[in-house]
Image (spheres, rainbow, N blue to C red):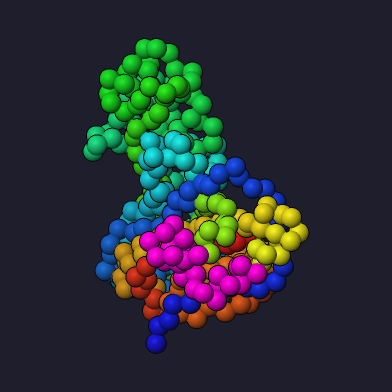
Amino acid sequence: MKSIICIALAGMVASASALADDSSAALGAGGIELTKSADIRMAKEDLRISPDAVAIRYEFVNDGKKDIDTLVAFPLPDIDAYEYWGTPVGRMTDDPVNFVGFNVTADGKPIAVKVEQKAMHDGRNVTATVKSVGLPVNVVSGRNYQRFAKLTVAQRQTLKNAGIAEFEDEPGIAKWIVQTRYYWMQHFPAGKTVIIEHSYKPVTGQAFFSQYELRMTPGNKDEYWKKNYCMDARTLSAISARMKERKVSGKNDGMLTAYSTDFVLKTANNWKGGIGRFHLIIDKLKPDNVLSLCWNGVLKKTGPATFESTRENFAPDRDLKFVVLE
């Protein structure tokens, strides 16, 4: 019988090492995607994930009688530059292209990946226009948005004429969608196993978690936590106790910091069958942090800050979303 589980860990909640002035949004990346194949199956996937890092190890088997060379891709999450211009996005590197620090190997050897990054607006590819004024396609990561302030009058007019930027408020606002995809051709020998490993830094969101989020009034903002992370009454009661401890100590008026991380898991359905054996490790980083998530299956505590789950013949029907409160 499947069950939706939620974990709330008691104990003294450690203070956050740094708190942002406001909240930041999480962007969900995931694993690699293969061109659909009738012969390539995923025998095993090991996923280790925390608010700071994602590491995945795959074992692919070619059950066919012929070698297969197929396209493999790692799509990064789309970024709506207009939507996130005034809303901070979670931690990203300053590299406008590889803003999650993606790295991949096959059978222990580094893969020379190619990258495709486009600026899209209303279905139009406006990459050439963006680059013509000296801007990177991704103006959201790092401090790349500051480049808008250095645009000349003529460059601003170019973007305005194309309908992909506004300049009513200085220094301007980008209006395109950033689409980034890494890809390469992968060789799968007949009857052999290929091990692909990749890692990256997730774009984890950050927000304050206050007494308001504990009310769970239907239709209010706090329903977000209940619906997305299965925070039931027992979980919220444990969180409330930790918040009271912090308030007594005079720390941030009792508020916690919520780190939300999303992982696109459903892409595991794009090869032959499901996943033969799926092993998940979630690391909440500190023993006293609180972890909450929805998960169909058994999730066991295996260390001071880690929880693990193993599924056989796994065909995920939902993505992985979890929150860590510090």
Q: Left or right of 20: which side holds 45? A: left
Residue drawn at x 48%, y 30% as measured from the top left: 145
The vertical placement of 165 against 53, above or below, is above
Q: Residue furthest top?
A: 153
Residue drawn at x 60%, y 42% as measured from the top left: 21
Q: At which x and y percent is residue 229? A: 47, 66
Q: Quadrant of residue 247?
A: bottom right
Q: Quadrant of the N terminus?
A: bottom left
Q: Residue furthest right?
A: 249
Instruction: Give, as a single range, the part of the protein colored magenta.
Output: 215-241
Residue drawn at x 38%, y 61% as measured from the top left: 219
Confirm whether the magenta stretch covers residue 277. Answer: no
Q: At which x and y percent is residue 278? A: 46, 74
The vertical placement of 159 against 210, above or below, is above
Q: Left or right of 52: which side holds 203? A: left
Asked whether 92 or 205 is in front, the reply is 205
Q: At which x and y percent is residue 25? A: 48, 48
Residue drawn at x 37%, y 67% as measured from the top left: 318
The vertical placement of 105 against 227, above or below, is above
Asked whether 7 or 152 is in front, the reply is 7
Q: In this orientation, does residue 54 appear?
A: no
Q: Quadrant of residue 249?
A: bottom right
Q: Quadrant of the C terminus?
A: bottom right
Confirm whether the magenta stretch covers residue 217. Answer: yes
Q: Residue furthest bottom?
A: 1
